[in-house]
Image (spheres, grey):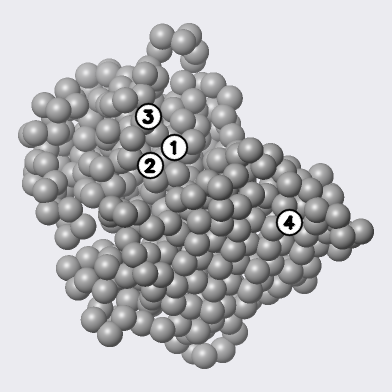
Amino acid sequence: MDTNNNQKARIALVGAGWWAQGWHLPHLKENPSAEIVAIVDSSRQPTSALDPNLESLDILAERYNCKVYTSLDHMLNEFHETGDELNGIIVSAPHATHFELGRKILEFQHIPKINILMEKPFTTCIQEARLLHGAVQKLGRDRAFMVNHSANFRKQAILAKSLVDSGALGSIRHVTAFMGSPLIWIFDNPKNSAWNEPSGSMLGNGFAWGQSSHILAFLYLVTGLQPSRVFCTMNHSEKTGADIAHAASIMCECGATVSLSGTTLLPGDAHADPVVGKLIRLKIFGSKGALIYSGDGRKVESGSLQFRREDGSVEEIAPEDGFKFENIDQEGNGPESLQAFIDACLGKEFFQGADCAIGLKTVQTIDAMYRSQKSMNAEPVIFGSEEEAL
């Protein structure tokens, strides 16, 4: 593929809801290396309880100077028939639709090398996650599939992963991970059914799928651990039934243990003025040292990466970069995950912060968390052949 600096990645967006209109579309418009070529939504007038002022497809077509469709099939077939170039698709539709949309894109043979950026979570069904993982594994190396866990693509994630990969921590023995999100207004609102109500084979919906998927994806990127068994308890919103807090113990194949907890009961609002940041507490303990990464997602000065050696000495890693987790800034030309996706679409080198394997581990863990909450027993992580998953 031609990688000259004047080329723009031609990108379509599937799903024109709250996050698409508030983040993806403005970022793509501002990005000099990207061009929006199509917007797809099943409704000509997208709606969301999270933003009552969403624009119609007709207005979006005019604002972003692109084609609009109410069907992914229609869009794909029309681009095939016209021969128009399509380098990548961002899937920003409701969680439970990710598998079906991803499958259609992967199976469409008439347009080669469509790269995919899938919003989190990867899927909300373990069987679908295994099938999608199997399909992605068959792609060539010149085609990228990413899950939009933006924290995984930031410099701090890369530095943390490099430190663990170097062997400086020795073998990973224990991890503690906490995430507090000021988003109870989402999970307590019955109108936010896609965030709060289970559909299909889901045993539950709420904070685990909507938020804990982020910190799980981060710790799996950095540590490379493979979960094997999970015990979890949850509590739920009295208004929606969504899970709003959990405590989980995760046993890993190598013998390491993970203590995972989180809640959406942190007072404030992550998307209002004044902005309240998400609180992250991540501690990774190895046989030779420990890695500490904690802070407020809206306050860079609130923390930094710390490497604690066996002798008790502490090294601040890139302290000038401070603490950065998810990149949810609405201004500018997009988070590091979007930059990496655009580079992939242009055939350039990029850092893969959240591939389908990390997406699968995250779904495996959350699926086991919900099964454990229901059975009140430790539940095994589901493995097996992707081809036999359904």
Q: Amino acid at mark 4?
A: Leu
Q: Report the Cα–Cα distance between label 4 and label 1.
A: 24 Å
| Badge 3 vs badge 4, beta-carbon distance below 8 Å | no
Mark 4 Cα shell of 10 Å, populated few (<14), some (14-19), many (≥20): many
Q: Report the Cα–Cα distance between label 3 and label 4.
A: 31 Å
Q: Report the Cα–Cα distance between label 4 and label 2.
A: 27 Å
Q: Amino acid at mark 2?
A: Asp
Question: Quick one: SS at disc 2?
Answer: loop
Mark 1 Cα shell of 10 Å, populated few (<14), some (14-19), many (≥20): many
Q: Report the Cα–Cα distance between label 3 and label 1.
A: 7 Å
Question: Quick one: SS at disc 4?
Answer: strand
What residue is disc 4 on?
Answer: 291
Q: Report the Cα–Cα distance between label 1 and label 2.
A: 8 Å
Residue 75 percent coordinates (x, y) = 22, 33
Q: Give me the disc on residue 335.
A: 1
| Badge 3 vs badge 1, beta-carbon distance below 8 Å | no
What residue is disc 3 on?
Answer: 333
Q: Quadrant of residue 162?
A: top right
The residue that appears at 22% across and 19% down in the rendered structure is 82
Q: Amino acid at mark 3?
A: Asn
Residue 22 percent coordinates (x, y) = 26, 43
What residue is disc 2 on?
Answer: 329
* In the displayed structure image, the side of residue 108 where residue 281 appears, left or right: right
Query: Measured along the vertical axis of the image, is residue 199 above or below residue 94?
Result: below
